[in-house]
Image (spheres, rainbow, N blue to C red):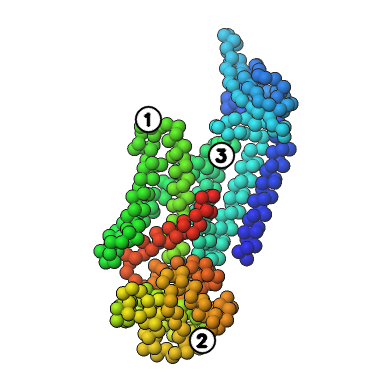
């Protein structure tokens, strides 16, 4: 179903592009030059039009359209020309109001007018509506896919992308549609300026949520460093908050705080526009990451699992389990008990983890011993004792399962880990070519915000080329 949805989306985009090109080529040889001059007369006034050079476009008609003075033009040759047009606004003095407009006609005989730094053309409104229709279809498919991933328990970076793009496109759609309804879009260039304005609007709208998240990240990092040590990874939230605040000052704040000659320069305007897009893009992805990680931790696996992988973490020197890792094993045991009571189906446990420098035994064997003390028979335990990372947990556990039961893609697999670590487990299982459903074990609240940030950083690194392209 997912592939069909995105296939439909791609086909729709291709058809939209083809329609837009064909339509513009069919009507582009004619152009209505709007003057934005409102007159109360019933008939157009006396006008004067000169072209330099001639032979590029010609004047077909001068008329009033809803009270506005407009000039109808037709392409007659290729090249660039400047039109000076005006009208007599004082019979007594003979004064004429004039305006200069630049036009270009290319090899496809389409008249292009330079407005707001971009080329405007006949049929631009229809093209804008096609673009908006494409955005509508994209938002529907992205949201549909997001909810589909949630329903099926397929949490991952694809789900994050669907959520993040949905946020941004929905804001663009709402803002531009509002401006269209209020007749504020009078050129293709104005449409693109509105899309750019959406970036600032988005940053302002997301500012309260981002401010709260930044504060929570900083506070959680303080707690984290007090309880878990002053490691660089435990200070990610503080660094994130500082960078976000600085970027916000350089974008939204330039209009109210940094009103200087430098902040009003053309170079800074380009820099600020680029930063607006970058910041808005990553804010949407970050919020989507938070939502996906939260939903992943709250997801409840179906009671039909054949195997339960238990992800390892630090144990005591004597081989006993620390509270964090024991919580993961207890969560796996509680799930297996619930499943057996519901339908009599037993699951095989795969405790996974190698031996650390300060550990007397491997984490996998330590968890296996604990499982035996809880009444789990030996035949329901397949310990994996070599992995040193979460990626290797999934990779080596897959090998253990396939060595004992065949193709893992034909089995129903769950994994148990701490709630803040659930989303990473989904991602790394997918990287190893199999689907899982997560069993969440509770832990201290201050782990959560930093974990969201780590998943976001992982998303950026893992999909760096796609983000660079975007």
Above or below — where is 401 with respect to 291? Answer: below
Distance in Å between CA atoms under marks 1 and 2: 72 Å
Please state which of the two labelled residues, at mark 1 or mark 2, is closer to the viewer. Answer: 1
Instruction: Indicate which disc residue 261 carries.
Output: 1
Quadrant for residue 387, please give it: bottom left
Please provide percent x and percent y for residue 343: 51, 86
Which residue is outermost to the front?
Answer: 357
Direction from residue 321 to residue 296 in the image, left or right:
right
Counting the numbered discs, the total is 3
Please provide percent x and percent y for residue 67: 61, 27
| Residue located at (34% from left, 65% from top) | 447
Distance in Å between CA atoms under marks 3 and 2: 59 Å
Instruction: Indicate which disc residue 279 carries.
Output: none
Residue wearing tag 2:
345
Residue wearing tag 3:
191
Q: Is residue 305 visible?
A: no
Please provide percent x and percent y for residue 62: 68, 23
Above or below — where is 376 with respect to 172? Answer: below
Earlier in the chain: of badge 1 and badge 2, it is: 1
């Amino acid at each position: 179903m997912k592939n069909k949805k995105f296939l439909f989306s791609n086909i729709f985009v291709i058809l939209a592009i083809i329609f837009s090109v064909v339509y513009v080529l069919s009507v582009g040889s004619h152009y209505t030059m709007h003057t934005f001059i409102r007159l109360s007369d019933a008939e157009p006034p006396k006008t004067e039009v000169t072209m330099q050079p001639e032979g590029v476009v010609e004047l077909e008609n001068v008329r009033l359209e809803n009270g506005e003075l407009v000039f109808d033009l037709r392409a007659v040759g290729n090249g660039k020309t400047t039109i000076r047009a005006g009208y007599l606004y004082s019979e007594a003095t003979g004064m004429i109001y004039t305006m200069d407009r630049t036009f270009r006609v290319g090899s496809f005989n389409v008249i292009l007018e330079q407005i707001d730094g971009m080329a405007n053309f006949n049929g631009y409104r229809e093209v804008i509506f096609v673009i908006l229709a494409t955005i509508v279809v994209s938002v529907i498919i992205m949201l549909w896919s997001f909810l589909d991933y949630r329903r099926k328990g397929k949490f991952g970076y694809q789900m994050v992308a669907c959520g993040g793009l949905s946020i941004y496109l929905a804001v663009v759609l709402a803002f531009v549609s509002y401006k269209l309804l209020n007749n504020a879009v009078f050129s293709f260039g104005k449409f693109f300026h509105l899309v750019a304005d959406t970036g600032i609007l988005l940053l302002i709208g997301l500012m309260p949520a981002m401010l709260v998240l930044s504060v929570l990240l900083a506070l959680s990092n303080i707690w984290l460093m007090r309880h878990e040590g002053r490691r660089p990874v435990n200070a990610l939230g503080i660094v994130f908050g500082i960078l976000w605040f600085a970027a916000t000052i350089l974008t939204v704040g330039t209009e109210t705080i940094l009103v200087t000659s430098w902040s009003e320069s053309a170079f800074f305007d380009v820099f600020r526009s680029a930063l607006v897009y970058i910041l808005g893009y990553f804010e949407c992805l970050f919020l989507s990451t938070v939502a996906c990680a939260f939903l992943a931790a709250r997801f409840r696996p179906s009671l039909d699992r054949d195997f339960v992988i238990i992800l390892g973490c630090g144990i005591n020197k004597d081989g006993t389990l620390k509270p964090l890792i024991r919580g993961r094993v207890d969560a796996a045991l509680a799930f297996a008990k619930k499943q057996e009571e519901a339908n009599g189906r037993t699951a095989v446990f795969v405790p996974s983890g190698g031996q650390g420098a300060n550990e007397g035994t491997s984490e996998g064997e330590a968890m296996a011993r604990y499982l035996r003390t809880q009444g789990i028979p030996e035949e329901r335990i397949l310990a994996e004792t070599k992995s040193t990372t979460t990626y290797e947990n999934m990779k080596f556990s897959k090998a253990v399962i396939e060595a004992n039961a065949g193709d893992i893609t034909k089995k129903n697999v769950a994994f148990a880990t701490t709630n803040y670590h659930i989303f990473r487990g989904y991602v790394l299982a997918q990287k190893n070519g199999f689907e899982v459903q997560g069993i969440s074990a509770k832990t201290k609240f201050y782990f959560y915000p930093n974990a969201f940030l780590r998943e976001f950083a992982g998303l950026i690194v893992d999909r760096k080329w796609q983000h660079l392209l975007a």
